[in-house]
Amino acid sequence: MAKKFKIKTGIVVTIRKGVPAGFGMGSSAASAAAAAVAFDSLFKLHLDANDLVRYAGMGEMASAGSIHYDNVAASVLGGFVIVRTCPLDVITARPPRGLVLCVAIPKIPVPQKKTEVSRRALPKNVSLPDHVRNLSQASALAAGFMRGDVSLIGSSINDIIVEPARKHLIPGFDAVKKNALKAGAMGVTISGAGPSVIAFASQSSNHGKISQSMRRGFASAGVQCTTVVCRPSRGASVA
């Protein structure tokens, strides 16, 4: 960014971050988003959303080795994002106020180059029926956010391609998912590339019960975990 805008000044960036690295929660994207937004504000560049996401993507490439526009777009802008590339175009929607997320973060060793390991687990080929089914769920998910329909969002969290291929990397995943759904979660899936697991719930759900059920699921596999109850954010901002 300094090179692009011909800004000749020394900058030291200090990061204090509560997002654990390597657990499928977009840690590197959070750092990159914060840096891009801070630089834009400091030098009054007034960049638009697409440019901020593009520069944040460059930052993630530098730190993580590859660009995940879905992660950096969500970190920069918050809410629900749809990213199109060539050219880069980010579409955003504000989630409904009633959407609550319960995240379970297992205390397990994370392998080096975890993203590469997770990607190698994915199938080389996907059948047309499975592709159509996943695409229909993704479309319904987008519609749920656009309509502000928490129930539709939850029922659309049903991935039959990536989740089955990666769940063996997460001890106790099936028990965590089963327990959370039984406790009132509307949808459960792997957060990013894992190993964290995320449950989608409504405002009226018993979030403590869902979180406890997820901890029990991991405990059944001999794994401890921490849980966080949160809501969608509005993205990176300057305090």
Image (cartoon, rainbow, N blue to C red):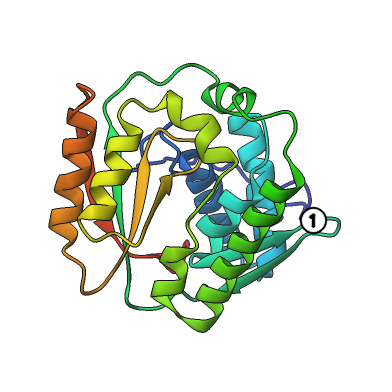
Residue at figure coordinates x 64%, y 55% from the top left: 133
Q: Is residue 141 left or right of residue 87?
A: left
Q: Quadrant of residue 132?
A: bottom right
Q: Is residue 212 above or below residue 171?
A: below
In this view of the protein, can residue 1 be seen by the observer? no
Q: Secondary structure at mark 1?
A: loop
Q: Amino acid at mark 1?
A: Thr
- Counting the numbered discs, the total is 1
Q: Is residue 172 above or below residue 37?
A: above
Q: Is residue 232 above or below residue 166?
A: below
Q: Is residue 67 left or right of residue 156?
A: right
Q: Residues within 10 Å of mark 1 (few under 14, many from 20)?
A: few
Residue at figure coordinates x 51%, y 35% from the top left: 164
Please give the residue where the numbered disc 1 appears in the rendered image: 85
- Front residue of this view, candidates 195 and 173: 173
Rendering coords of residue 104 (x, y %): 28, 42
Q: Is residue 232 left or right of residue 124?
A: left
- As drawn, the residue found furthest toward the right would be 86
- As drawn, the residue found furthest toward the front would be 129
Rendering coords of residue 205 (x, y %): 21, 68
Q: Quadrant of the C terminus?
A: bottom left
In this view of the protein, can residue 39 be seen by the observer? yes
Q: Quadrant of residue 68?
A: top right
Rendering coords of residue 206 (x, y %): 16, 64
Residue at figure coordinates x 46%, y 81% from the top left: 148
Residue at figure coordinates x 50%, y 52% from the top left: 34
Rendering coords of residue 28 (x, y %): 51, 39
Q: Is residue 60 left or right of residue 233?
A: right
